[in-house]
Image: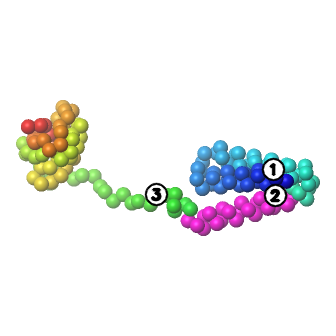
């Protein structure tokens, strides 16, 4: 009797884990079903058909109840990422007034990409020829291509 209860509880917990925590992994769901099937088999061999029917009814009722309670408790919302991404691609540097020859200061280390401040505007830039430029170093715009700004250390 104790083994049947332990197998039933472990099986239900594994199936709940498959549904709520690790969906699609398949392993915990299969192990849970195996535990439940074994518990039903043992209840049949120990108590006969009546034991099997009672075991199946109790197991199904518990599963349905626990899944409904878990979903009603907004478990999915606690596990889901609810952040909205409201950023967009950087605009054309020429629209910001940035052109070749302008000077500024690197805000972060360029290795080879980072942020620079040019005319009080922080923009993302790439160091020319892949060189490393430390933060707070003076830089000069060497090329503007599409939406990319290339700078070199002064």
Within the image, what quadrant is residue 87 found in? bottom left
Is 5 positioned to the left or the right of 132 in the image? Answer: right
Label 1, label 2: how far apart the Cα atoms are:
15 Å
Look at the image and tell me whether residue 40 can be seen.
Answer: yes
Label 3, label 1: how far apart the Cα atoms are:
39 Å
Q: Residue at x 22, y 53 (%)?
A: 91
Look at the image and tell me whether residue 126 can be seen.
Answer: no
Residues at marks 1 and 2 touching, judged by CB atoms closer than 8 Å: no
Check the image and report above or below for 51 versus 107.
below
Magenta region includes residue 59: yes
Label 2, label 3: how far apart the Cα atoms are:
36 Å
State which tag comes first along the sequence, 2 or 3.
2
Q: Residue at x 72, y 51 (%)?
A: 11
Within the image, what quadrant is residue 61 found in? bottom right
- Mark 1 residue crowding within 10 angstroms, few (<14) / some (14–19) / many (20+): few
Is 138 positioned to the left or the right of 124 in the image? Answer: left
Give the labeled residue for mark 2: 56
Q: Nearer the viewer, residue 93 or 60?
A: 60
Give the labeled residue for mark 3: 81
Is 109 positioned to the left or the right of 74 in the image? Answer: left
Q: Nearer the viewer, residue 154 or 85?
A: 154
Tell me the SS state at disc 1. helix
Q: Which residue is drawn at 71% across and 49% down?
A: 32
Within the image, what quadrant is residue 85 found in? bottom left
The span shown in magenta is 53-74
Give the labeled residue for mark 1: 3
Magenta part mainly helix, strand or loop? helix
Residue 80's spot in the image, x, y percent?
50, 58
């Amino acid at each position: 009797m104790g083994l049947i209860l332990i197998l039933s509880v472990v099986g239900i917990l594994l199936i709940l884990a498959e549904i709520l925590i690790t969906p699609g992994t398949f392993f915990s769901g299969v192990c849970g079903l195996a535990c439940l099937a074994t518990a039903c088999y043992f209840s049949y061999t120990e108590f006969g058909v009546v034991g099997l029917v009672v075991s199946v009814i109790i197991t199904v009722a518990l599963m349905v109840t626990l899944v409904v309670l878990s979903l009603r408790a907004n478990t999915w919302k606690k596990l889901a990422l609810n952040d909205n991404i409201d950023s967009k691609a950087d605009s054309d540097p020429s629209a910001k007034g940035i052109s070749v020859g302008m000077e500024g200061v690197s805000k972060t280390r360029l290795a080879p990409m980072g942020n620079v401040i040019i005319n009080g505007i922080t923009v993302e830039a790439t160091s020319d020829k892949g060189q490393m430029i430390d933060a707070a170093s003076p830089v000069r715009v060497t090329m503007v291509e599409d939406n990319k700004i290339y700078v070199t250390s002064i």
